[in-house]
Image (spheres, helix red, strand yellow):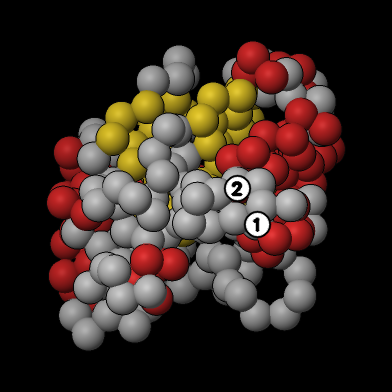
């Protein structure tokens, strides 16, 4: 597991050693639940305090966002979640936002002034629809946050070496996401990025490497974050 230090937040990132966080398609869902429980406990988090970012790849809209609060705890974890969203926004402390990933960015947006936290999925599909900027616009519109006050952290993701974005002249996910966040008004000094390339670091699951036959398991690592 990987710890990220941002004042006011508890951010945790799982690794292959924590086990896969992907339930969909798993022959043993209880094993995945057990992986999640252990990962949360090791990071002083409680799984039943979490809400899953319920993204899907159906349709043609990849900039769907929703607000969640304490009443949404456990949705997508052990309660049904009748929602499709590429990012979740909350102003509830103690609510954990949880996003399984494999190559795409789990982006954390945090404004300590309005106590606003967003966890948004930024992959190729989202970025091609200006998902970085749209996430910030959603957050500022719903909470009144000033983009200049927002702190952004971009989690581990595929680098351009093995996953160039053709629609962006071969740039990486991190590069494009950074540009889009800046275009929404987030200051460059308030954007930090994980140095980890999921396609070359065996500590992280990579869907693209699995498809190439270079990883045995089509697993998911995860980003979990809450305000403290």
Can residue 1 be seen? yes
Residue 125 lies, with reference to residue 222, above or below; the image says below
Can residue 37 be seen? no
Q: Could you say which is closer to the camera, residue 37 or residue 177?
A: 177
Residue 58 lies, with reference to residue 76, above or below; the image says below
Callout 2 secondary element: helix
Residue in view at x 50 percent, y 50 percent: 161
Q: Could you say which is closer to the camera, residue 90 or residue 18?
A: 18
Residue in view at x 24 percent, y 34 percent: 44
Left or right of 50? Residue 81 is: right
- Which residue is disc 1 drawn over? 165
Left or right of 23? Residue 83 is: right
Q: Could you say which is closer to the camera, residue 22 or residue 45?
A: 22
Labels 1 & 2 near each other (Cβ < 8 A): yes
Q: Earlier in the sequence, mark 1 or mark 2?
A: 1
Quadrant placement of the N terminus: top left
Residue 211 is tagged as none
**Horizontal and vertical percent for residue 227?**
47, 29
- For mark 1, does the 10 Å Cα neighbourhood hold few (<14), some (14 to 19), or many (20 or more) residues? some
- For mark 2, does the 10 Å Cα neighbourhood hold few (<14), some (14 to 19), or many (20 or more) residues? many
**Horizontal and vertical percent for residue 152?**
60, 29
Callout 1 secondary element: loop
Q: Indicate which label's residue lies in the foreground, 1 or 2.
A: 1
**Horizontal and vertical percent for residue 107?**
56, 41
Quadrant placement of the C terminus: top left
**Horizontal and vertical percent for residue 199?**
39, 54
- Which residue is disc 2 drawn over? 173
Q: CA distance from mark 1 to mark 2?
A: 7 Å
Figure quadrant of residue 99: bottom left
């Amino acid at each position: 597991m990987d710890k990220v230090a941002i004042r006011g937040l508890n951010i945790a990132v799982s690794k292959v050693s924590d086990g896969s966080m992907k339930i969909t398609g798993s022959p043993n869902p209880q094993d995945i639940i057990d992986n999640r429980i252990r990962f949360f406990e090791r990071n002083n988090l409680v799984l039943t305090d979490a809400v899953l970012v319920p993204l899907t790849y159906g349709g043609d809209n990849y900039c769907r966002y929703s607000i969640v609060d304490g009443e949404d705890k456990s949705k997508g974890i052990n309660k049904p979640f009748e929602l499709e969203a590429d990012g979740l926004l909350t102003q509830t402390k103690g609510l954990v936002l949880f996003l399984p990933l494999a190559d795409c960015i789990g982006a954390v947006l945090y404004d300590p002034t309005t106590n606003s936290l967003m966890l948004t999925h930024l992959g190729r599909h989202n970025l091609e629809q200006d998902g970085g900027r749209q996430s910030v616009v959603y957050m500022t519109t719903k909470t009144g946050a000033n983009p200049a006050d927002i702190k952004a952290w971009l989690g581990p993701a595929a680098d351009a070496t093995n996953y160039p974005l053709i629609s962006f002249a071969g740039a990486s996910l991190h590069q494009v996401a950074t540009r889009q966040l800046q275009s929404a008004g987030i200051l460059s000094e308030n954007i930090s990025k994980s140095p980890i390339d999921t396609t070359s670091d065996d500590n992280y699951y990579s869907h693209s490497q699995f498809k190439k036959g270079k990883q045995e398991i089509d697993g998911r690592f995860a980003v979990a974050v809450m305000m403290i």
